[in-house]
Amino acid sequence: MTAQQHTGKAPMMFQVRFHGRGGQGVVTAAELLASAAFGEGKHAQAFPSFGSERMGAPVMSFCRISDRPIRTHEPVTEPDALIIQDPTLLHQAELFAGLGTEGYMLINSTRGFGELGLEEFVRGFHPDRLLVVPASSLAQEHLGRPLPGCPLLGGFAALTGVIGLDSVLAAIGERFAGRVAEGNAAAARAAFDFVTEERKALSDA
Amino acid sequence: MPYQRIKFYQTGSFAVGNRLLDPGQRTVQSGAERSNTLTCGHRACQGCGEALGARYALDAVMRATQGKMIAVNATGCLEVFSTPFPQTSWQIAWLHSLFGNAPAVATGVAAALKARGRTDIRVVAQGGDGGTVDIGFGCLSGMFERDDDVLYICYDNQAYMNTGVQRSGATPPAARTATTQAVGREPGNRFGQGKNVPLIAMAHEIPYVATATVADLRDLEYKATRAMDFRGARYLHILVPCPLGWGSSPADTVKVARLATESGLFPVFEAETGQVTSSTPIRHLVPVTEYLRLQTRYAHLFKPAERTEVIARIQAGADRNIARFGLLPDNNSAERAVVPGPAPADSREGQ
Amino acid sequence: MLKQVEGSRAVAEAVAMCRPEVICAYPITPQTHIVEALSAMVKTGDLAAEFINVESEFAAMSVAIGASAAGARAYTATASQGLLYMSEAVYNAAGLGLPIVMTIANRAIGAPINIWNDHSDSMSQRDAGWLQLFAETNQEALDLHIQAFRIAEELSLPVMVCMDGFLLTHASDQVDIPAPELVDAFLPRYQPRQVLDPADPVSIGAMVGPEAFTEVRYLAHRRMQQALEVIPAVAADFLASFGRPSGGLVRPYLADDADIVVVALGSVLGTVKDVVDELRGDGVRVGALGIGSYRPFPAAAVHEALAGRRHLVVIERAIAPGAGGFVTGDIRTALADSVPHISTVVAGLGGRAVTGKSLRGVLTAAAAGELEPLTFLDLDTGLVDRELARMSGTRRSGPSAENMLRDLGITASRIG
């Protein structure tokens, strides 16, 4: 089943939940995704889980993408995709709450599922829909700072096809300027290529 | 603008003094063309110091601004006795909002005028001691901190008079009020720290701060006029005896105000950017008792027996003021006021 | 122009286009992004206005009062505790007939302190004499500010535009930001009848005694009733000028033939509409009625929309302890001649999510005739029962929140 035809919800509604820690750009990532979808003429909504902001605390943000106006503002309880920006959150049981077996997941890490202790967990899902991508490393390499948001979006585009890489790059270009925009875009492209390769390898295997 | 300080002894009638001067040097009040900002028909008590002080101050500001002034008034005696709907005794553009927000409302008026390019129109905020020292204090400090272009005038009669003479943060020690009654072991108001708003205004280092009383018309008019030379936040604190609340004779209002200054209890001075620039010397020093005896709010200090320790403490307060502000310059205790650190020599005259 | 922006930003841009002359605000979550954006616009010169950083919300409303009385278009924003802190000035502004516009980023009132969304703040000031308009979406939030200045200045009454804190203020949505020329054409310059002007002096704010106070209040009441005509007229003009429906008194959704109608204010209506569609798909005849203008309360419009409906489910985003909801009473009065069965559902207090799932449960129960007259959506009955049991045991039982924490074992009372 493709991302476009989804599980018993209203025509084309794709919901993403981001997890990270305060200061990692979790809210920005959700907004960039919404911006990318908007750039493709889709309807989108992005919002954070609200709390007293402090650096380092676990935070969530959400993004909904749809082909028609989005009316609800309730939290995303049944995400179609999870994007985990900080692997140190993986010990939290409720991190994966609501993700169906058809769901997608991207984890920012240089380690594999085995090392992360998720080997058992991922068996219930499509193998080419749950991936690990070294987003922080890619960001460090292309941007000079380990901010995983943009590369994870590039990876998301490759993983789900819900939005195109070009839209992600356009959104980055609008939000940031100069070297920061270039670095983030390069990291996003690198992550897109990485995920594309991974999926190809999995389907070839 | 140079000011010639005219020194002559005021006998209680200004007519003599004014007659001896050039028209240009006479008081605003002596002129037929004075604004009469607060005109007759208001409902103030006989001998009300605040009614006097308000007319003196605002007529001077009106002359200084050629009539281009808007006043914002806090709730209190002045507002209540001047605007019993459908009448008003104000001949100016005048706004009353609430008790504690006169400084903020004035800030809003000034902002509107600035937004419309009419900074030629000046803004005055005014209130009693309650609305200034207590409930309006936060707004006052905010206005000072932002240096909003407002002259704030406090008419200090040292208690919440309009509501029936209750104690305020400006009520002096030992004074009788409805909530610090002359009963029990320590009758009257307690000896607290007081709240010296002129000094607090100076701590904000606003362009101009001054104190005055209704006993010295010329000085009060000078200060109100001088304040209008500056732009930014300015503060004028005027002592205005209240015959009803103080228990003094309505005929003694000016005299009681003069005794407050001559005893040292109410220092009269000016300051710019946090530094005292002048203080009015005491001409004939009097002991505080001469001032206290004229007011029944202090009657319990004398009857049934004289409370010498309390009076001595009050006297000590007066002596401290004399030393601090150099009110007896021939005397060696000519200390200047203690103010926060040296302020930059920031000229704020004119725009 | 279509944009994907945070609700607060959209509102700031709309307010800026209304050409306010004095903006004064004190920061409080969740209104901060609105005033921050406006302060930046003023600083760069993109918006020609005076921006005053005030020292409290009481000062904020006071500065707005002074500015408006001096003839300037004035704006401020607040929420929750801040709205309460300025309450004296809120009443003062209405009494003085000053057309100030204020955004309320709806947030719960403490104690216990809570920064999340509900309607208790707006409800606390519903009797102050201000108009209260509720936005369902961020689009409507920005549109309502443009309408608000016009409505306020036409009536000489202040207007609160209420938008759900966080849910709308901090959500990035697709909105259509109108062209400035359209806003200028829609919103004429502010020209008050009475203004502080040395050239034409007047005393504003006199003390009015028993001989005239009743008349003043009667006229204020009449003016509020007049607002019931002005609000839809302005909404109609907005539709004509900007091409989309926004504002107005009430907005029915599939209510005409509904057996059950959900009545609500604010952003929850979005979720309600999704649930209505789903249930309709299952053959349940439900509908919804959004209340756009809560004050003045549009009794006639409500009557027209709901007369003949058998069952109403009123969602209350605030509660008056010991008394119940707020909106329920207004609805009941509007339908006094034929009161239908009304179920009050208190939901979303202090930011608890009102989910489609829970709403479906409520409406299914309603359809089966099993919904109680008053329910608290998603109440943790276990936690509540334990506390009630404890309270019944002792008299001086103390504050509930702290007691519940003890129950959950979170307090440090047993160290060592």
Image: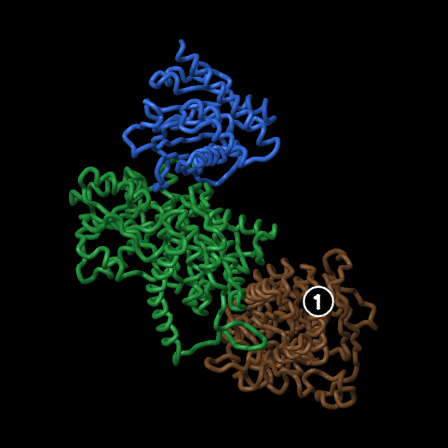
Chain colours: A blue, B brown, C green
Q: In this view, does A192 lie to the left or right of C292?
A: right
Q: How many marks?
A: 1
Give the residue at mark 1.
B230
Indicate the position of residue C189 as horizontal and vertical percent values: 50, 64
Extreme residue in the top direction: A205
Indicate the position of residue A28 as horizontal and vertical percent values: 50, 35
Chain of the residue displaying label 1: B
Indicate the position of residue C280 as horizontal and vertical percent values: 21, 41
Q: Is residue C272 left or right of residue B82?
A: left
B143 to C285, vertically: above or below: below
B50 to B101, vertically: above or below: below
Residue type pointed to by label 1: Phe
C67 to C356, vertically: above or below: below
Residue C302 picture quarter: bottom left
Q: Is residue C206 left or right of residue C368?
A: right
C222 to B242, vertically: above or below: above
Indicate the position of residue B74 as horizontal and vertical percent values: 54, 70
Asked whether residue B296 is in view, the answer is no
Asked whether residue B146 is in view, the answer is yes
Quadrant containing the N terminus of chain B in the rendered view: bottom right
Quadrant containing the C terminus of chain B in the rendered view: bottom right
Q: Is residue A182 left or right of residue A198?
A: right
Question: Which residue occupies 66% across, 81% down?
Answer: B256
Residue A144 picture quarter: top right
Question: Which residue occupies 60% across, 83% down?
Answer: B248
